[in-house]
Image (spheres, rainbow, N blue to C red):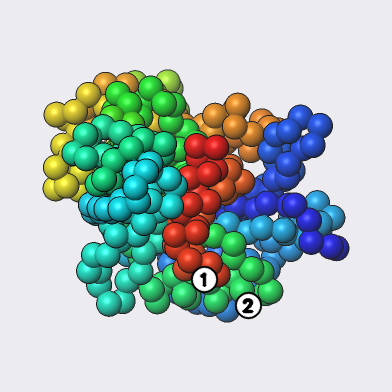
Amino acid sequence: MAKTNLIVGLDVGSGKMTAIAAAHDADTNTLKVLTGRSALCRGLKGGMVSDIRETSTAVSALLGSIERECSQNIGQLFVGVRGAHLASFSSHGTYNISRPDKEIVQEDMALAIENAKAVPIKNDNEIVSVIPQGYAVDKQTGINNPEGMEGSLLEVDVQIITGATTHLNNLAKAIQRPGYRIDGTFYGLIPLAESVLTADEKENGAMVLDFGGETISVAIYIGGILRFSCDISYGCDILTSDLSRVLRTPRKAAKEIKEKYGVVHPDFLKQDIEISVPLLDGSSTRPVKTSELLNCIQPRMEELLEKVEYYASMSGYKTKNLPLVGVITGGGSIMPGLPTLCMNVLGLKEVRRGYVQRDLITSDEEYFSPLYSTAMALTIYSSDGANLDDMGSYEQGGSMADKITKFFKGLFG
């Protein structure tokens, strides 16, 4: 199989990996999803590698099956990372324009961003992403794109996302062992939010919640700009653990029961039916009402959402004081009643489930599921050239100024 234009987004999640393979359709001039896969991975925990060999084996099986189905080698591979080791903060950069004509060009914008990156970070951390938030020209603020304007002093505010170098390197090694090349590494929440939010939602105020198995990723946009993001080291797998313990049933059975009968709000318990639950001995069962499941699931999900509120308020963005809409996605977002619970606990004005916007990509319906949202968003984000704004943790070719210049050409050109 020869190298092709096959683009793959690999979402490294909590104990599993999900991949979407897409290619540019010359007839429609659009990006088209060819296939998608999701696989459990015992070598991952909370989005971080706990066993390189297990993770490499899972990568090889997952990506190999995609290549065989598409009858093509992977041309570009973009990886989305997550985990509590990721952190974000704001920074400010300036650049003095000394040329006689004073006209701002993309290289000036790139150098201002480079200066914004010149901040101390932990020795064992590295920059994963730098996201421009807005510019000022000679103290005139509120500028989204200063290219072509005249001025002497260019300023930029950015959001910087860092990650633990050892975790990022271990993940890179696990993916590269089977022979795959990483073309870009992202904080997966960023392309996800860009793909599921509308421009009006980002402008008016929106919170994105990505419910994974062992993490919940949170992003807040206000005024069209990413203001806050974090990964919380708790996820929906804890609901499975609770059910397993309370019902005295194997974890696998608890997961199946949660997915088939679980709801998180009483308004969505349409019938309080009796189900048969297998016990730990593997041979006997006992009857359980579905209301008992609700009594176990709802308090725990409320606790998870209270942690979201805590982390947001600690950063200065208390959700109950902001006119935010909520967009929920990820495998855990499918549970009935979660939008209502999010409104009640977080004070959000409205909540919807987030799907990748259909004008961004062509796909069969099954891949628009929240399960595939991050992987699909990675292919879209990367194919637009936005990945060139990332720091190239594993691909160091070219200067950063060149990379960011290419990013702006893709964004504004």
Q: Amino acid at mark 1?
A: Gln
> Which of the two residues, 12 or 132, is positioned nearer the viewer here?
132
Is disc 1 placed on a helix, strand or loop? loop
Is residue 110 visible in this depiction of the protein? yes
On the image, numbered disc 1 is attached to which residue? 396
Q: Position of residue 380 (x, y in %)?
A: 58, 42
SS under mark 2: loop
The residue at 44%/59% (across/down) is 401
> Residue at coordinates 72% horizontally, 58% vertically from top-left?
75
Q: Is residue 386 above or below residue 17?
A: above
| Residue 267 lies in quadrant | top left
Image quadrant for the C terminus?
A: top right
The image shows residue 67, relative to residue 153, as above or below, that is: below
Q: Earlier in the sequence, mark 2 or mark 1?
A: 2
Q: Which mark is residue 177?
A: 2
**In this rendering, position of residue 37 left or right of residue 41:** right
Residue 193: give x, y in percent of width and height: 43, 39
Image location (x, y in percent) of residue 191? 47, 44
Is 103 or 110 nearer to us in this picture? 103
